[in-house]
Amino acid sequence: MKKYLTALFTTLLFFTLILAGCGNQNSKSEKIKKGDISLINIGNCFIFTANEGGSISKISVKNLKVVDNYKIDGMVHNIQVSPNGKIVGATVIPSMTMNMKGKAIFFNPISNKIIKEVEVGNHPAHLVFTNDGKYAVVTNNEDNNISVIDMKSFQVIKKIPTGKGPHGFRISNDSQFAYVANMGENSISVINLSTLKEEKEIQVGDTPVTTGITSDGKTLVVTLNKENALAIIDLDSGKIDKVKVGEGPAQVFIQSDNQFAYVANQGSEKNPSHTLSKVDLKTKKVVATIETGKGSHGVVTSPDTKFTYVTNMFDNTVSVIDNSKNTVVKTIHVGKTPNGISIMP
């Protein structure tokens, strides 16, 4: 009996680890009939990567394997799952032979069917949904503006000027402000999404790439690529602290409980970095440096904060990190040159 219970506990623990990261998918689990572990249903939960080689990879959270890898005409730069998990949006930069502006594509994460393609600006970088489901916002890197897309009509309702070279950004939890990193002028554009205007710019440091904002809207983080640092900004006081991270930091992601920010250190293609910096936002210190693949770029944590997923651009892989151990527990091969990454809530 003791041996049987040990085996049962081990099996249940395995499924608990699988369920981690699926957020509200846990509510879909069926009750386990006595002696029948196979009846567990974890629902549909996926991770998506934007691959600059011209594809999107869809990874099952259940078994950490690619279940779809579908081709896209053009370079897929960034990807984002909507807050309700029903739509995935991605930015696509056309190839040199395509006479068109960039576009945002929206598709169903379960069926993979395209819902809508929306023309935006030149060299679209990141796409982020507002939490209230009202807008999808896209940065147009070469046009120095953002496109605001109404999610009911799938129409661009406004183009808002930013600083030079807008790239990565996040939107506050209350859907009021977008904090856009302007790579070309070392600033952050604060966009008011109620007035649809740039409210101000914050000077932060050399080559900001991406931002993150805590759920209370009080702390902004910014990766400074040329300074090998993460800027931590108190938005009330304006105070900026800089934390040294790895070489050539790209994306940053703040986990849902706001305790840690994870910084993917990309380096360059010639001299790729291969680490993830785990920064404690209270102490403003790096508490762990985790080895990944070459050119770690995109990063996202699971909703339950147990795992972090990192795209490695020059290895064509995703590293799965156990946050309790700060180690890679799985490496997944995806499409060519994976960039952005997002997980279903």
Image (tube, helix red, strand yellow):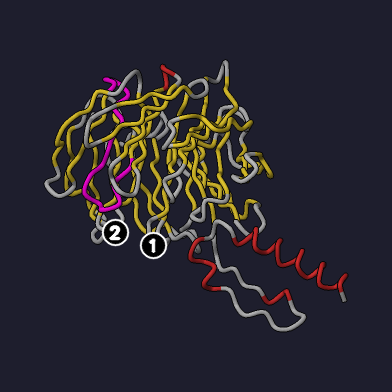
Do the numbered discs 1 and 2 sit on residues whose CB atoms are within 8 Å?
yes
Mark 1 or 2 closer to N-term? 1
- Image quadrant in which you'd find residue 29: bottom right
At 67% from the left edge and 57% from the top edge, which residue is drawn? 63
- The circle on residue 84 is 1
- Image quadrant in which you'd find residue 222: top left
Task: Identify the residue at the far left of this view.
Answer: 195
Q: Is 179 within the magenta?
A: yes
The x and y percentages for residue 244 are: 46, 22
| Helix, strand or loop status at disc 1 | loop
| Helix, strand or loop status at disc 2 | loop
- Looking at the rendered structure, the number of numbered marks drawn on it comes to 2
**Amino acid at the residue labelled 2:** Gly
Mark 1 crowdedness (10 Å alpha carbons): few <14, some 14-19, many ≥20: few
Residue 43 shown left or right of residue 102 in the figure: right
The x and y percentages for residue 25 are: 52, 66
Q: Is 72 within the magenta?
A: no
At 38% from the left edge and 23% from the top edge, which residue is drawn? 242
**Amino acid at the residue labelled 1:** Asn
In front here: 304 or 107? Answer: 304
Give the magenta-colored segment's residue range: 170-186
Q: CA distance from mark 1 to mark 2?
A: 8 Å
Task: Identify the residue at the far bottom of this view.
Answer: 34
At 25% from the left edge and 53% from the top edge, which residue is drawn? 174
Residue picked out by circle 2? 133
Mark 2 crowdedness (10 Å alpha carbons): few <14, some 14-19, many ≥20: some
